[in-house]
Amino acid sequence: MGTDFDKTRYEAMDRQSIWHPYTKHSVIESGPLPIITRGEGVYLYDATGRKYLDAISSWWACNLGHGHPRLVEAIIRQTKELQHSILGNLSHPRAIELATMLNDLFPDDRRVMFASDGACAVEAALKIALQYWYNLDRPEKCRFAALDFGYHGDTLGAVSVGYLKSFHKPFESVVFPVFQAPSPCCGACAFHEPGQTCLEECFDTMRLILREHAHELAAVIVEPMCQGAGGMRMHSAEYLRRLAELCREKEVLLIADEVAMGFGRTGKMFAFEHAGISPDMVCVGKSLSGGYLPISATIVRASLFETFRDTPQDHTFYHGHTFAGNPIAAAAAVETLAIYQEEGIVARAADLGKVLAEELQRLKDLPDVRNIRWLGMIGVIELEDDAKGRGAIRAAAIRDRLRREGILLRPLGNVVYVMPPLVTPEPVLRELVRALGCAVREIR
Ligand code: PMP
């Protein structure tokens, strides 16, 4: 790799054979296509040797950066021992260790259902919620509530609870209807201008849904503290506290989708910890393995698991994926959690989050910016927008400029954000925000 000839040939082969996810044809057809060949620390390198700061941790997964020697070693070690064996009627050491480590992160007793992708962890949670009520002879509790601007993955169940008209209109005929409450994003919600307190109005519809429909609701699903793909929309811990309390009072399960925010991103191990709540199910993925291999999990309260016995009636959960808990992916996850513990990654993320906040606060006077917000290691600059989508066009230009400067990010419409690895050196983080500020100031 590395010669121009290679790059040209590989670009042509790519255009001939790959269907890129979430990518417009026109971008692939017309734009430059960096072909990433190597990763080291917080940097990615393309086939021409160019270095890029991975400012979105490769879709929010690589919290420990790239090429971590311990993770590489753990994967190689496991590959030589056992590559794959199923968890149906069998078990293996890495899955047992990983489930134990995950269980230990919770104050109460949990059971762990493994899968590979975040969406699959969400699908399992939705199905567990449905069957839980069925097991208890309350099959009428079969509907879900979720938040506007929520995103939970791209399978049909996940799309149903994370319905975004701009993405999902073609699937309208098959997704199931869900009660949708307004997104409670402080500073960018439907009720108030930035800086005002609006919790009552934000929570009102959710309260109404729970009061009027608890009898038919299986669960509420939310992304705690920050709705990621819907635009990095952050809400207060108090919103979550109220939601958890009402769910408990009304006998509705609460599912926390921590696929994006879990494992330190918000400055806590799990984002729901900001609210001191204990969701009935927690979905994790992405950085569970440090982003090295696909593995996800649905972490379920043991009291729910108990209703899935096969006597006197068969309530077995007939659900599973071929690669659920794959030993190599599980080995990467075990090592990831060990690194988190030994190196105090979550505390480090919280400290770095303060640096990120400090740098973003310096950018208060940026032109045509609607809102700047942050939480832990997430920094957001939401650009002014109009009916013609000028904000998104400007955001794409900012992305292109930063890419030329060696920074990889990927705005969500008019929302430009950074979510760098939790091990980003402090000077690199400061420089990232400064470069972002310059780009926003100069590109109008
Ligand atoms: N839930 C949330 C909150 C996510 O952000 C994502 C992915 N961005 C998913 C679920 C789906 O995860 P995956 O892409 O691994 O299926």
Image (cartoon, grey):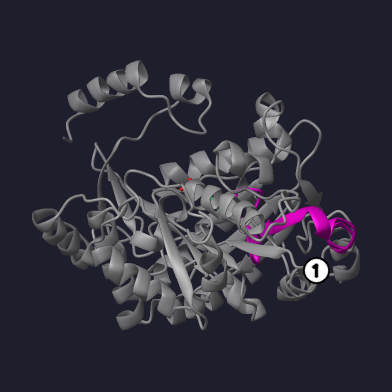
Could you say which is closer to the camera, residue 165 or residue 14?
165
Which residue is at 63% across, 40% downward? 159
Residue 325 image offset from top left, x and y in percent: 32, 55
**Can the viewer see residue 55 in this picture?**
no
Is residue 413 depicted above or below 194 in this figure?
above
Is residue 41 depicted above or below 58 in this figure?
below
Is residue 425 depicted above or below 380 in this figure?
below
Residue 52 image offset from top left, x and y in percent: 35, 49
Residue 28 image offset from top left, x and y in percent: 45, 24
Magenta residue check for 223? yes
In the displayed structure image, the side of residue 401 where residue 443 appears, left or right: right
**Can the viewer see residue 233 in this picture?**
yes
Could you say which is closer to the camera, residue 169 or residue 421?
169
Residue at the left extreme, as displayed: 80
Q: Where, quadrant-wise, is the N terminus in this rendering?
A: top left
> Neighbour class for label 1 at 10 Å: few (<14), some, many (≥20)?
some
Which residue is at 65% across, 33% downward? 167
For disc 1, the marked residue is: 250
Which residue is at 51% across, 72% downward? 302
Q: Mark 1 vs ligand 1: CB under 8 Å?
A: no
SS at mark 1 in the image = helix
Could you say which is closer to the camera, residue 381 or residue 267?
267
Residue 155 image offset from top left, x and y in percent: 54, 38
Magenta residue check for 150? no
Residue at the front extreme, as displayed: 312
Image quarter for residue 195?
bottom right
- Figure disc tally: 1
Q: Identity of the amino acid at label 1?
A: Lys
Magenta stretch bounds: 207-231
Q: Where, quadrant-wise, is the C terminus in this rendering?
A: top right
